[in-house]
Amino acid sequence: MKLLYMLNIAFLTGLLLPLTYYSTYAQMAVDTTVDIEADSSNAASGKSYDPKELTIGKGTTVTWINRDSQGHTVTNGNPGETTTDVLFDSTKDPSGFLIQPEGKFEYTFDTVGEFPYWCQVHPWMTAKVIVMEKMETIGGGDGKEFSPPMEAVTEDGDIKVRVSWSPVTIDSGIPIDFKIETIDSNTNKPTSSKLYDSMLFDPDGNHVDASHRSLQSRDIQTYTFENTGTFTLRLENVNNTGQAVEFSITVVPEFPISIVAALMAVMFAGAIFATRKYRPLMGRY
């Protein structure tokens, strides 16, 4: 009996493993980037990290890209701090102390909290990453769960744009509601001007959806992704400034129902076979 029980458990485990793997894959975080701005090594330029404040979900990988002509660091903490107990520090990267021009540094945030950081070579450069849990419930009584927001800042730094979506898992063929918010970076309140044009581009750069003009600082746009890959959500003429921001959206493939059915059939047949084959042995165990 013990042997038969163990065989059935093994077959069921084999069936559940691919489903568990897909569930993890479908819920993967949407990664994002931060630019180390050109001329940020010049203290008088006012340039730094863009965006200076980034809100992400737990499990997201952030990639810093150096757009400047000089080397920089990305070091958790505040200017002048000498503690070695930091969450992330590009100076410890095997590739070298500095992130060279057009070089990259990445870190995956698995801890919830607020994490300031700075450049050890140019201490006027400071920024912050805010890490939230995977989901947050948006008010309004609709009960929808939206992803933690992605953020981007206009080139002049005056307007912060936040984008989140529901359902949290973006599958092809399913309508997705995107919540788009424009925020005054100085007051951290909704902007007074409420105009932008949102457009969606497929992985090949083709415009795949009609432009949507919004007249609200907090709006919902609905898109349906017909295929998979990395799409670009672009907002143009944000608040009549002529500036644009972009977001990369990853669409995962749906797990084919036919494969699930086939796996279940195979594993069920295997369980029946094991039951019949080893029934004579049951008395020995």
Image (tube, rainbow, N blue to C red):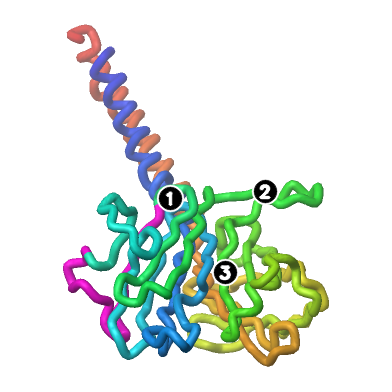
Where does residue 258 sit, x and y in percent of width and height? Answer: 48, 54
State which region is magenta: 92-109
Q: Residues within 10 Å of mark 1 (few under 14, many from 20)?
A: few
Residue at 53%, 71% in the rendered image = 249
Cα–Cα span, label 3 and label 2: 18 Å
List the residue tagged with mark 3: 151
Mark 2 element type:
strand
The picture quadrant where one finds residue 247 is bottom right
The answer to the question of whether label 3 and label 2 lie on touching residues, with beta carbons closer than 8 A, is no
Residue at 54%, 81% in the rendered image = 202
Q: Amino acid at mark 1?
A: Thr
Per the image, is 202 magenta?
A: no
Per the image, is 96 magenta?
A: yes
Which comes sooner in the sequence, label 2 or label 1? 1
Quadrant of the rendering where the N terminus is positioned: top left
Image depth: mark 1 or mark 3 in front:
3
Q: Amino acid at mark 3?
A: Glu
Mark 1 element type:
helix
Q: Amino acid at mark 2?
A: Thr
Residue at 48%, 61% in the rendered image = 129
- Look at the image and tell me whether residue 200 can be seen: no
The picture quadrant where one finds residue 220 is bottom right
For this rendering, which residue is in front, 230 or 189? 189
Taking 195 as reference, is 5 above or below it?
Answer: above
